[in-house]
Amino acid sequence: MAETVELIMRFHPVGGEDVLVLTTDFVGPDEALETISRALDERRSLVLTRARYDRETSENALIVNLANVVSVRVARNDSEASGQYL
């Protein structure tokens, strides 16, 4: 089984500032984007079981309502100019 990596996800909501979430739920960006795409297609929320909101130290479960999200960036490194968009 492949090891998971910590991914940085930036959710851009319809209104307001980006939301930064760090997660180890996926083995890489491709798996994360596939899961997000599936959730969007099925019109359901994204459920993350191992996530940290905006660099908090404790890991928790997190549910993201994708109905209010315009775009998502998934990257291995935190950078304004890197990562894949959905």
Image (cartoon, grey):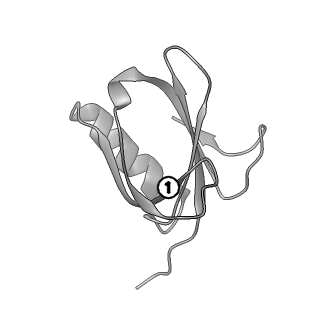
Taking 58 as reference, is 55 above or below it?
Answer: above
Q: Is residue 81 left or right of residue 47?
A: right
10 Å neighbourhood of mark 1: few (<14), some, or many (≥20)?
Answer: few
Q: Which residue is mark 1?
A: 30
Q: Position of residue 80 (x, y in %)?
A: 77, 38
29 or 14, nearer to the observer: 14
Which quadrant of the structure image shows residue 85? top right
Residue in the foreground of this view, choosing between 6 and 82: 6
The quadrant of the image that shows the N terminus is bottom left
Q: Quadrant of residue 84?
A: top right
Horizontal relation, residue 62 to residue 59: left or right: left
**Circle 1 SS class:** helix
Q: Residue at x 45, y 53 (%)?
A: 32
Q: Residue at point 45% right, 64% down?
A: 26
Taking depth in this image into account, of 2 and 25 the one nearest to the observer is 25
When the figure is inspected, residue 13 is found, relative to residue 9, above or below; the finding is above
Does residue 37 appear left or right of residue 6 in this picture? left
Residue 53: x %, y % from top left: 54, 49
**Residue type indicated by callout 1:** Asp
Q: How many numbered dots are placed on residues in this image?
A: 1
